[in-house]
Amino acid sequence: MRFELDDQQRDFAASIDAALASADMPAAVRAWTAGDTAPGRKVWARLADLGVTALAVPERFGGIEAHPVDLVVALERIGHWCVPGPVTESIAVAPVLMADDDRAEGLASGDLMATVALPPAVPRAVDAGAAGLTLLAAGGLVSDAAAQRSHTSVDPSRRLYDVTPFGDGRPADVGRAYEAGALATAAQLVGAGQALLTASVDYAKQRTQFGRVIGSYQAIKHKLADVHIALELARPLLYGAALSLAADSSDTARDVSAAKVAAAEAATLAARNALQTHGAIGFTSEHDLSLWLLRVQALRSAWGDPAAHRRRILEAL
């Protein structure tokens, strides 16, 4: 089976890259961390103009109702640029939970940013303080929820909130919402891992040591080649899981978990080798690389850590 993107999907990815490349993403992430969401919301507005926020929303609510592969394409680019905010929750998960909710029109237009808690796997809602809608999903029902106590994350741009439900619960496909969340998070991990690899390769071509650029040393070449291989092996699993989700296959849980594990491990390897290539400077808060390193750490455990997803794979075999 081939997992090759068509021209339209490649053009879509390129349009996202062009829109985000012209924004100062590190500044937007730092502002979001400090509580100033305005620069980040401008980035979200650009994504809305491209139709990214409408991808998973049903057509009757002004959405695109796109194929999950298209969603993966967009989320990978968003991960590459380290976009702040509840990306997985608002773009991939909330549209599933709000399949019969008129408020989904706001998701499609980008006017509404949503976040989700889905215990026990996702006990807290990320960025509930910035989102216009917080949802709590469990047991086949979804309810509106109110943000309570906030908690810091390993990634300071992602604040986690305890939430309490209010109002009546509404039937929702909570199982599919979880799979969409895990898949979207895996896509962001692959994108972030690719960004770290690109940054490491560029740095290795410039940094000199003992009169030679460090990229000329076999040890550096082998480490970065290992990252490239890990990312390239994760991508087919990512697209395969998207196809399973689209077909509502009985293997969806297994395939999504395989993608999440591969993406998490590849991105973690990319982060580790990026730090080794750059040296200690890469982890200082002043260096932009640190934003991607912390994002990978946070997304690695978000929507199920590798151990939880390995258990699901084992149960499916």
Image (tube, rainbow, N blue to C red):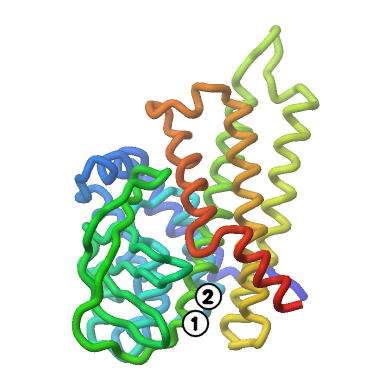
Q: Quadrant of residue 160?
A: bottom left
Specify the amino acid type for callout 2.
Answer: Glu
Query: Which residue is disc 2 drawn over?
Result: 179
Query: Which residue is pictured at 27% across the width and 51% down the height?
Result: 40
Image height of 86 relative to 138, above or below: above
Q: Amino acid at mark 1?
A: Gly
Image disc number at residue 79: none
Q: Marks 1 and 2: in contact by CB < 8 Å?
A: yes
Q: Secondary structure at mark 1?
A: helix
In the image: residue 104, left or right of residue 200: left
Where residue 288 sits: x, y (%)? 42, 33
- Residue lying farthest to the right in this orientation: 218
Point out which mark residue 175 bears: 1
At numbered mark 2, what does the secondary structure look like: helix, strand or loop?
Answer: helix
Residue sitting at 65 percent across and 43 percent down?
Answer: 269
**Could you say which quadrant of the image residue 55 lies in?**
bottom left
